């Protein structure tokens, strides 16, 4: 109960910090108040994933006739959000950001309410699909609005504040979900996740109405079908790969490869492609996007790795394991708040190289962790990795700058897809390492702590390789001028 009270206190304090920081930053400028409005749904999107994790077992008990129903409440939400993000981006550019934002808020809230009152597994899944549709709209809309509202030296700061809301939703979700489960039941986790979205809906009238782009060519239906199916099948294979038979896995991989080449060829020859491949092939887009993918993968893999260490090796409860992650998550949040100012002083390349070097040293330190517990240097290592993760908003800003204002929603949707793909890869990475190390492992098997620790060290070595790749690319990234970005946009 005390842990739950702490989680509520942390939620209110952190939300107050965002409000206070933004309001004192630019009291005279309504755009900074609008930034808070855009951060609220982002928190809900993350909460809708993390808050449900504490209720997977009770959901399974509520619908015992449906195997793995708890896990499927997470999977269908993530798959829907990822697969529809790019089509949603085109709709936002065509029909206006505010209109699509309104639809996204309503659909998200409706999905949460339906999941809360569901008396069957099918209604529960339908509610989660609706929330996923809302999430597919809200995440890129928030980024697109920010890309239009802010410019120049203000943009890095704004993106840093937005990134802090992502971290806040990640940290608060498991704590709030565990508290709700301890004092009530699983049905309340869904509307609780939607509370920030409800506030955003009430304040919706303050958002500017940007005119829709009437000059866009007809919709590329084939392209959008390919761009929806490709992330859906990819994320499904990543998420469920360890539980699939070899024949099914090979079939899925073959379908994904074939669909990739079909979609690529269509986008290449189409007169009006859903996504302009020339922009995606330019280093000004793919380099920050690649770093975004790597860092999101490292972030989620580190969360899963540390949770497994505290829970399975240290023997902590789920709530205590989540509390043990706070230094890592708070480092991410603190860096998110300050990354915009740091970027203005240091430049994006110097900032990324410095934080990659610090995180790389931290990962090397974690190779010596033992089963007894963390040393002070291990906690510093975890914080060092968190500092790197806090810079991802600046990478989103650089990647989205390759899209003109009238296609800001499309650029934001591609960025959202990169984020989702990185998080999914990171979540699957520890499971993949474990399945390779212990190919005959069954769910009922009990793994000795020392063997779990050995597997954890292997996982860290894999992460070190990813850190090395990211550091190599960080040395080559740069802050592009408006004129250079204009050349890419015209192409």
Image (cartoon, rainbow, N blue to C red):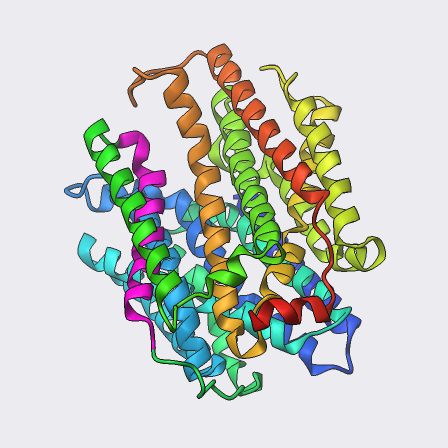
- Against 249, residue 445 (above or below) is above
Q: Residue at x 75, y 42 (%)?
A: 353
Question: What's drawn in magenta, residue-wise?
Answer: 219-243
Q: Quadrant of residue 475?
A: top right
Q: Residue at x 64, y 55 (%)?
A: 395
In the image, residue 262 lies at what x, y percent?
30, 54
- Against 381, residue 261 (above or below) is below
Residue closest to the eye, 10 or 183: 10
The answer to whether residue 193 is magenta is no
Judge left or right: residue 469 versus residue 304: right
Which is the main secondary structure of the residues drawn in magenta? helix
The answer to whether residue 231 is magenta is yes
> Which quadrant does the C terminus fall into?
bottom right
- Against 480, residue 243 (above or below) is above
Residue lying at the far front of the rendered structure: 269
Q: Answer yes or no: is residue 474 visible.
A: yes
Q: Answer yes or no: is residue 38 visible.
A: no
Residue lying at the far right of the rendered structure: 345
């Amino acid at each position: 109960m005390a842990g739950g009270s702490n989680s509520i206190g942390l939620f209110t304090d952190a939300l107050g910090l965002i409000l206070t920081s933004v309001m004192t930053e630019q009291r005279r400028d309504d755009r900074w108040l609008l930034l808070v409005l855009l951060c609220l749904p982002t928190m809900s999107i993350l909460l809708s994933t993390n808050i449900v994790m504490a209720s997977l077992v009770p959901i399974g008990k509520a619908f015992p006739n449906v195997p793995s129903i708890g896990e499927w409440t997470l999977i269908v939400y993530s798959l829907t959000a990822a697969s529809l993000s790019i089509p949603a981006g085109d709709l936002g550019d065509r029909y206006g950001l505010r209109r699509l934002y309104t639809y996204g808020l309503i659909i998200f809230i409706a999905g949460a309410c339906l999941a809360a009152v569901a008396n069957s597994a099918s209604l529960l899944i339908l509610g989660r699909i609706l929330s996923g549709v809302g999430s597919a709209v809200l995440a890129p809309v928030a980024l697109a609005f920010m890309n239009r509202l802010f410019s120049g030296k203000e943009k890095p700061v704004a993106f840093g504040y937005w990134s802090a809301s992502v971290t806040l939703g990640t940290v608060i979700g498991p704590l709030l979900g565990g508290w709700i489960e301890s004092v009530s039941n699983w049905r309340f986790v869904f509307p609780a996740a939607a509370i920030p979205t409800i506030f955003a809906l009430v304040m919706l009238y303050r958002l500017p109405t940007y005119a829709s782009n009437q000059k866009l060519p007809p919709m590329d239906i084939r392209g959008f079908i390919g761009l929806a199916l490709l992330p859906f099948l990819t994320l499904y294979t990543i998420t469920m790969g360890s539980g699939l038979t070899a024949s099914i896995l090979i079939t899925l991989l073959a379908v994904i490869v074939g669909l990739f080449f079909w979609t690529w060829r269509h986008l290449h020859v189409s007169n009006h492609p859903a996504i302009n491949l020339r922009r995606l092939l330019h280093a000004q887009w793919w380099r920050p996007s690649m770093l975004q993918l790597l860092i999101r993968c490292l972030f989620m893999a580190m969360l899963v790795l540390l949770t497994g260490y505290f829970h399975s090796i240290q023997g902590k409860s789920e709530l205590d394991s989540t509390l043990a992650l706070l230094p890592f998550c708070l480092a991410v949040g603190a860096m998110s708040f300050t990354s915009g100012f740091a970027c203005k002083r240091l430049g994006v390349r110097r900032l990324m190289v410095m934080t990659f070097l610090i995180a790389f040293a931290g990962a090397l330190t974690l190779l010596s962790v033992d089963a007894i517990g963390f040393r002070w240097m291990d906690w510093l290592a975890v914080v060092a990795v968190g500092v790197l993760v806090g810079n991802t908003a600046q990478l989103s800003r650089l990647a989205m700058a390759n899209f003109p204002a009238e296609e800001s929603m499309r650029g934001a949707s591609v960025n959202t897809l990169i984020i989702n793909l990185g998080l999914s890869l990171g979540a699957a990475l520890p499971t993949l390492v474990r399945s390779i190390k212990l190919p005959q492992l069954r769910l009922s098997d009990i793994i000795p702590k020392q063997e779990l620790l050995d597997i954890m060290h292997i996982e860290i070595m894999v992460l070190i390789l990813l850190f090395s790749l990211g550091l190599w690319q960080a040395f080559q990234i740069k802050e592009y001028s408006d004129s250079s970005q204009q050349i890419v946009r015209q192409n």
